[in-house]
Amino acid sequence: MHSSLRRAFRHSLFSVVFLSTIPVLLAQSNSGTVTGTVTDPSGAVVAGASVSIANPVSEYSRTVTTDKAGHYQFTSLPFNPYHLTVNATGFASLSQDVDVRSTVPVSLSTILKVGAASSTVTTSRTLAVTRPPARESLFGAERRFRGAHEQRFGSEWRRRS
């Protein structure tokens, strides 16, 4: 009986140790978080700003909108370098690179510069394609040259040359 009690105790101890490691194993992750606040130059928060994060290599991208307090958050981002872009009406667009390398959240403070209104103008133009002149002999080119000068300077030009 003493050995069966000892065996039961070992199994119980093993079970407790094994089950206590499960939360630690589940907590290990290969994704991180990016959080931030968007403000203007005076320090006032910018609500409703569009914040995009993208990795051009993996083609992973997400977009969120800042809340009333100017906060945004991207969760479950795979470990990678990202390109973060912030856009808001009346402000210049801002871009920066962000590296997500651990489960420790990356916290950013983004200050947008006041931007002027911009517009895009698209113009189009049709170009006429002309054929290059046919090859002519040196004699023909000289005749045209002399003829043009005779018209301009008169027959005296011919006598001087």
Image (cartoon, rainbow, N blue to C red):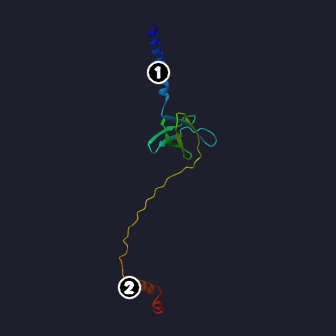
For the residues bearing labels 1 and 2, Cβ distance under 8 angstroms: no
Q: Farthest residue in the bottom direction? A: 159
Q: Toward the viewer: 71 or 8?
A: 8
Q: Quadrant of the N terminus?
A: top left
Determine whether the residue tagged by mark 2 lies in a helix, strand or loop.
helix
Query: Residue 132, percent across and down?
Result: 37, 73
Residue in the picture at 49% in, 21% down: 20
- The numbered disc on residue 109 is none
Determine whether the residue tagged by mark 1 lies in a helix, strand or loop.
helix
Query: Residue 148, percent across and down?
Result: 43, 84
Q: Badge 1 local density, few (<14 within 10 Å), some, or many (20+)?
A: few
Mark 1 to mark 2 CA distance (whole Å): 102 Å
Badge 1 amino acid: Phe
State whether residue 83 is above or below residue 158: above
> What residue did someone put label 1 on?
18
Answer whether residue 10 is visible to the viewer in this image. Answer: yes
State whether residue 128 is above or below residue 135: above
Q: Toward the viewer: 3 or 39?
A: 3
Q: Decide if residue 84 is on the left or right side of residue 130.
A: right
Residue in the picture at 45% in, 15% down: 11
Query: Residue 144, percent across and down?
Result: 40, 83
Disc nearer the start of the sequence (1/2): 1
Badge 2 amino acid: Phe
- Nearest-to-viewer mark from 1 and 2: 1
The quadrant in which residue 4 appears is: top left
Query: Residue 155, percent across and down?
Result: 45, 90
> What residue did someone put label 2 on?
139
Q: Farthest residue in the right direction? A: 42
Answer whether residue 74 is visible to the viewer in this image. Answer: no
Residue in the picture at 43% in, 62% down: 125
Residue in the picture at 39% in, 83% down: 138
Q: Badge 2 local density, few (<14 within 10 Å), some, or many (20+)?
A: few
